[in-house]
Amino acid sequence: MCGDGIINKVTNGFFKKYNSDLDLVDFKNIKHEVLVELTDVELVNPNAIMTKLPGGTHNVMIRSLGLRP
């Protein structure tokens, strides 16, 4: 079982980061074009695929998708 935090960590592992100045960014007032330039990243392995297999007793994702009552 994993939550949003684990999924975030795994997703971040798919990319090489180039810009460490993101701590100085005002994300509330930034334009999309500028954000894309600041977050210049490269895939570690372009052929890698990540998937999430939903499970558990109270699976919110499955219910949200209408796949289980």
Image: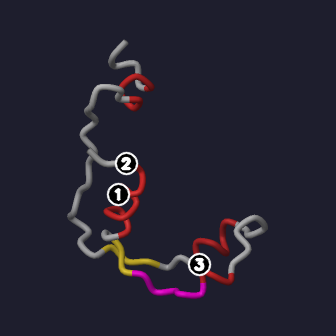
Residue furthest to the left: 47
Q: Name the residue carrying label 1.
A: 6
Mark 2, other Cα within 10 Å: few <14 / some 14–19 / many ≥20: few
Q: Is residue 40 left or right of residue 42?
A: right
Mark 1, other Cα within 10 Å: few <14 / some 14–19 / many ≥20: few
Instruction: Label 1, secondary structure: give it.
Output: helix
Q: Are marks 1 and 2 in contact (CB under 8 Å)?
A: yes
Residue 33 is a magenta residue: no
Q: Name the residue carrying label 3.
A: 37
Q: Is residue 56 left or right of residue 69?
A: left
Distance in Å between CA atoms under marks 3 and 1: 26 Å
Give the residue type at disc 2. Answer: Gly
Q: Position of residue 42 (x, y in %)?
A: 37, 77
> Which of the two labelled residues, at mark 2 and mark 3, occupies the earlier sequence position?
2
Give the residue type at disc 3. Answer: Glu
Q: Name the residue carrying label 2.
A: 3
Instruction: Label 3, secondary structure: give it.
Output: helix
Q: Position of residue 20 (x, y in %)?
A: 53, 87
Q: Which residues are magenta?
A: 17-21
Give the residue type at disc 1. Answer: Ile
